[in-house]
Image (cartoon, rainbow, N blue to C red):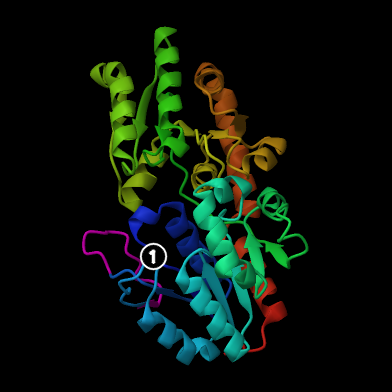
């Protein structure tokens, strides 16, 4: 079955949206589906991870806001019938509306990947703007397809909205690429989050300062794009003593292979997000690499993982993050055992093969066109 993913952009700046979409496509490929992507951004010659293993249809964006593109709209109208299913991402922008209209005319099943954008916390961000968009067309769009959520908690929170209660929905987790096992430095702590206030990097740095003052031995590395430059400056000012002592290094954004190598050399992965996230891809990346993970409970997948004993869930405060890191630094055997259990759980529940099969079963159930 050919499956078309319609998304405004897969540029590196999209972060988890890009990572989750590309991983989903690769999981679907592993299950024998034939995913393709329709997006607006052009290839980036400076992007070493621009995907060349997936068919990508790229269109010129229009001059209007909200991802308008006459070129994409006309192409979708002419080609929607070529696919067995269409999955639209980012319900607030025009490409999702183009996909819905084209799918409806072609009689092709439509899926709407919410990517956390229907979470109450996300809906409250730019509330007036979203309220206008909701009544201008997003509410109608939601009624035209099956909503896809990445966790049960994501589903429950989003469907608490009065207009979404009873909407058709499925839960399919984000897949994770299983990494080769590498014995890292158990005292090396890695954070792979963009520098943005929602990501909690400042709280993580503050936790490291507490551990430093206690005399604990560790090194740490942060890698990620500086999406909010004022916030990045605050983080670097706070981290200055750690950087001066050689305890903490800022790497900036890294290509996929270098990020995986950094994770492989880690002893602990920290995901300190302070804003709600529908999933938390980096948590699963750490688990897939066999690393003990300290994960904020603001990532909606964390409570489920914490319940199964495969991550250490924390409130994203310097005190709670420091407490969890202290335990792992002082009991390396426990950290190793946690990493092993995490890897096995990730393999069983989030591998490309497993998630791809879930997608295949879901899409084949509703498909009327398996070309």
Q: Residue at x 26, y 16 (%)?
A: 245
Residue at image position (36%, 38%) is 195
Q: For numbered disc 1, what is the local secondary structure?
A: loop
Which quadrant would the C terminus be assigned to in this image? Answer: bottom right
Magenta segment: 43-57
Report if residue 184 is visible in the image: no
Q: Residue furthest right?
A: 166
> 285 or 348, which lies in front?
285
Q: Main secondary structure of the magenta part?
A: loop
Q: Residue at x 56, y 36 (%)?
A: 339
The tally of labels here is 1
The quadrant of the image that shows the N terminus is: bottom right
Judge left or right: residue 305 versus residue 238.
right
Determine the residue located farthest toward the left in the rendered image: 45
Residue 296, x across and y down, in percent: 56, 34
Q: Which residue is mark 1?
A: 9
Q: Nearer the viewer, residue 244 or 128?
A: 128
Residue 125, placed above or below residue 265 = below
Front residue of 338 and 367: 367
Residue 344 lies within the magenta run: no
User: Where residue 261 sits: x, y (%)?
Assistant: 36, 44
Q: Position of residue 218 (x, y in %)?
A: 39, 20
- Tell me residue 223's x, y (percent): 34, 39
Q: Residue furthest top?
A: 214
The reply, left or right, for residue 139 in relation to residue 258 is right
Q: Please determine whether, in this image, residue 71 is positioned above or below residue 54.
A: below
Is 56 contained in the magenta span?
Answer: yes
Q: Is residue 194 visible?
A: yes
Is 124 above or below relative to 306?
below
């Amino acid at each position: 079955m050919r499956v078309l993913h319609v998304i405004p952009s897969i540029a590196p700046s999209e972060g988890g949206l890009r990572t989750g979409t590309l991983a989903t496509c690769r999981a679907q490929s592993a299950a024998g589906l034939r995913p393709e992507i329709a997006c607006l951004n052009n290839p980036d010659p400076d992007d070493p991870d621009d995907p060349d293993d997936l068919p990508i249809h790229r269109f010129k964006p229009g001059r209007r806001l909200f991802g308008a593109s006459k070129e994409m709209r006309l192409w979708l109208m002419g080609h929607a019938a070529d696919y067995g299913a269409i999955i639209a991402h980012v319900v607030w922008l025009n490409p999702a509306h183009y996909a819905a209209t084209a799918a409806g005319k072609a009689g092709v099943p439509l899926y709407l990947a919410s990517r956390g954008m229907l979470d109450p916390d996300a809906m409250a961000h730019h509330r007036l703007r979203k309220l206008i968009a909701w009544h201008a067309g997003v509410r109608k769009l939601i009624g035209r397809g099956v909503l896809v959520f990445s966790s049960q908690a994501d589903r429950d929170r989003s469907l608490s909205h009065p207009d979404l209660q009873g909407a058709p929905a499925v839960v399919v987790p984000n897949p994770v690429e299983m990494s080769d096992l590498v014995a890292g430095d158990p005292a090396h702590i890695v954070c792979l989050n963009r520098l943005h206030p929602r990501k909690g990097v400042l709280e993580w740095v503050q936790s490291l300062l507490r551990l430093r003052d206690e005399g604990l031995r560790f090194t740490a590395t942060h890698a990620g794009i500086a999406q909010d430059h004022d916030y990045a400056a605050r983080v670097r000012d706070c981290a200055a003593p750690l950087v001066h002592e050689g305890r903490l290094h800022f790497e900036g954004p890294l290509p996929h292979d270098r990020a995986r190598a950094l994770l492989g050399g880690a002893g602990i992965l920290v995901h300190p997000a302070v804003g709600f996230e529908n999933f938390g891809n980096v948590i699963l990346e750490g688990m897939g690499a066999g690393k003990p993970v300290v994960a904020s409970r603001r990532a909606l997948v964390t409570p489920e993982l914490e319940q199964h004993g495969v991550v250490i869930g924390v409130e994203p405060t310097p005190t709670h993050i420091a407490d969890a890191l202290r335990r792992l630094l002082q009991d390396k055997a426990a950290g190793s055992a946690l990493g092993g259990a995490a890897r096995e759980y990730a393999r069983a529940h989030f591998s490309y093969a497993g998630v791809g099969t879930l997608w295949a079963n879901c899409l084949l159930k509703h498909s009327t066109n398996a070309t």
